[in-house]
Image (cartoon, coloured by chain):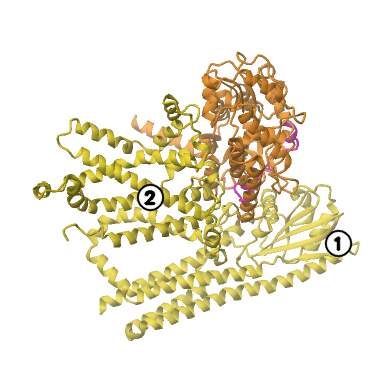
Amino acid sequence: MKRVFLFGFLLLSIFAWSQTQVILWHSYRGDEKAALKEVVEAFNASHTDIQIKALGIPYDAFADKITAAIPRGKGPDIFIYAHDRIGGWAEAGIIDPISFFLEENTEEQFVEGSWEPMIYDGEVYGLPMSLKSIILFYNPNIIKTPPKTTDEMIAMAKAHTNAEAGEYGLVYEIANFYYHACWLQGFGGRVFDDNNQPVLNSPENIRSFQFARDLYAKEKIVPPEVSNVLVTTLFNEGKAGMVISGPWFRGEINDVPYEIALLPEISEVGKPAIPFMSTEGVMMSAKSKNKDAAYVAMEFLVQEKAATIMALKGKQPVALKKVYDNPAVKNDKYLPKFRAQIAKSRPMPSIPQMTSVWSPASTAIAAAVNGNKTPEEALNEAQRKVVDALSKAGYKK
Amino acid sequence: MKKHFSWRIIALALVLVLLYLLLIRLQSNTMDWQNQRYTLDMAYTDTASLEAVLSAHDGVSVDTIQQIITALQSSNHQIQSIAVVQGRTFLAHSDSSMVGARITKEIFDIQRELQREEALPTLWQAPTTSDASATLYRGIMHNGHVTELIVYHTGMQQEFTPVASRLPIFLVLLGFFVVALLFEYFIPRYSAPISLVCFVIAVVLITSLLNAQFIRDYNQWQEYLGQYQMRLDASLNGTGAVLDVNIPHWYPKITSAIKTWNVTLSVVFGLLLLFILSGLFEKSFAGLIEYRMAYSYVFPAMFGVFLLVFFPFIYGFLIGFTNYGLGDFGSNLISYFSNLGNYSLGNFIDILRTIDLTDPHNFYYTLLHTIFWTVLNVTLHVSIGVGLALILNNPQLKGRTFFRVLLILPWAIPNYITALIWRGMFHKQFGAVNGFLELLGFQPISWFTQAHTAFLANLVTNVWLGFPFMMIIALGALQSIPKELYEASSIDGSTRWQSFWNVTFPLLKPAMIPAVILGTIWTFNQFNVIYLVSGGGPDGATELLITDAYKLAFEQYRYGYAAAYCIIIFALLLIYGVFTNKVSKASQGVYE
């Protein structure tokens, strides 16, 4: 009997060994993680020769882990991440282009604007899975109809702000450059110009910084020292009227009614706020040993079956067009609105130089909002720092 | 005499084997790169089956492609495969050994690699057997005419046979070894200098052997190139446009790479040989054998210390002299470190050059802030710690154990968690500290938006975290002070203060001074509190040197610059440690 077991076990292990294993790294939490798990299980059930093994890595350390692990051969075969690092990783030889594996009409299957961020230097480096941009969340018990312009937004927020009681009309990470970008781009500002040179201290950028400072200091509708934990806590306690956050925020809301609306039009310039859009895609490691199997896995993750699960269960605004024809998705309260906001967003710059921008830019917006520096001073300082860092960084280009 | 003889020879033999292996590794590194590209497994021998091997011809006519193939082929170079990419670039591959070709994916990879012009091979192996070679052609076409052709040739070897192909080098090393052996045996007195001279000659010989190979291949290349130019001119250039044939200018790169390697290897092995031949090696070796039991107990810990302490230290030290940054992560580490051109003092000059005490990002501002932070913190730690220890030392204090446990708690809880809690408490709107202040009737303070309040927040947190350590040390030292001294001093009529100053304090010193040194070094590098509580303060105003280095390394990816920063921190602390140790004679006992 023992021998039978042993033999059977050996047989199984040989069988398992003969399967190709594709290792997938992701940084999902909550609903997105559960949905991904379901997708992976569906894949493993339908493919006997390839198995995906998914591993969750915390978001803060994810990019660094990829940068460190893959060149040493220790990383995953495929991983899911936003598009903004594609440039840097492509230059460093960490990800491989998948142009070779692509079929003719792959590009058409995806929502407009989701394909370009996956391209760097003429080569395609990933398949888009979902599109993310920030949007306006509001508590329908506090705010009856969402604001269409920023003047309306400020008025509504003021009416519901009571600093003593800790209630604020508008709660968002005001001192975080990623969130501020919606105002920056709405005012007509940019991070890089057409020659990929940083233009952080352009007049439009300065105006947008002044706008943020006014939201905090003049109108006083935003609480001080906002961290993402504070945003979640205040909203869940019903003390935040409006929140500006992304689709991930849905997973953090507990039992509080919420609605979403497009970001308002900026009254000062009459143009809508344009947030950063990040395309989250699945990319292939350059050091993967099973590139063919890895691509099969990648393709599964973005096609209809998986995308529908990610959309409905993971609450992700997926990039596959066909999913939006699905009646369950059409009738979903939120997904079509996300798609509408994405149409009004602009992809985050994905050139390698962007990596050097985050830290000085966030310091600048924090200084401007807190009043330590005027917007002009803060941006001039940031521009100086970025130019300095870029000239010293070891870029090959 | 005999024993002396055998250890040296074994050591010499080890050195030579190492040297030889390194040279092979050096060569085979580059071989791997080449072999990856040219894995072949499908045969193609005649132009009739051209259609079958084309991956895509993207609008270019089959006629043109046949012309290209005819032009590039010669009696011993059959075109194995050709692919046209985006109608403009073609890649063709020939291999004289007539092994098959797997096209498409490999050629796509090659195309991508070739687009990064700098990633050309820095060393490659010349063909050693007569016809085992492969050639890659990359051409740019315009309107059906070839306007540019780049030719890559490499000696491809399916199997790498180290001894046979390295025979000359191996013989040279063997010869050196034999000569050294003979001198050692017959004339031991002069063996050391003679061995060194032999070594130098060996290195020179090896260098010139390697160089000769490359010169030979380069000349062969020039010849091939001339032939291709003529043939392509004749067959394809109908419009009379000038055909530009490029040869990659890697030759100077190869020679400089060889020079770098030779210099590095010579220095390393020269030093090693000196060490061996001067007799130091056998002394330490003899000691190792005599105390082998003790060493075997210590070895696991030594190994761990080496791996976790020395290796990262040396690595960081080396990086500090380079400009290792975001663009270098994909590159081969060994080639990066052995390239002497990467090293310079640039980082140190950058850091130390400007003195601007108004700019929080300036090194000297951060240095002064760190020193001020350290002095203030350690003073407070010691005063509060010693004060509390004096109180707790009273055996008649009720609930003494309870208080002791309570006062150690700040130190016992992981300071990461504590720092985050304190940060929450200092929040302007919802923090406990401001709530308390409001209760007392004061205005709430925005702690983290101004430099001096952020500094205060950090200070409070760190003092809260740090005094238990000093307290414990002081408590231990106090309990070792014999009571007779106190009795004697009270008999002599001294006041409490005098007995503290003359009895307690001198006997506390030997225990406290090492604690103070330790505390200083820890506080100087107190990363957790600064990073987690004020995050470096409003725009870098409360940064320490260590948090600045962290942000440079992991937010701006300027590894080299940050490593240089850390070397400076280390130098400062080392000087401090040695200096205070000498001045305070802390290592001496109190009764000496």
Residue B473 horizontal/vertical position (percent): 25, 46
Residue denoted by label 2: B375
Give the tally of numbered discs: 2
Neighbour class for label 2 at 10 Å: few (<14), some, many (≥20)? some
Is B556 magenta? The answer is no
Magenta region, residue range: A87-110
B589 left or right, relative to B315:
left
Image point (30%, 56%), residue name: B299
Instruction: State the residue in front, B272 or A107.
Output: B272
Which quadrant would the N terminus of chain A be assigned to in this image? top left
Indicate the quadrant where residue B277 lies. bottom left
Q: Which chain is yellow?
A: B
Whether B530 is drawn above or below B344: the answer is above
B415 left or right, relative to A258:
left
Residue A18 horizontal/vertical position (percent): 51, 39
Residue B467 horizontal/vertical position (percent): 31, 41
- Residue B236's mark? 1
Which quadrant would the C terminus of chain A be assigned to in this image? bottom right
Whether B407 is drawn above or below A238: the answer is below
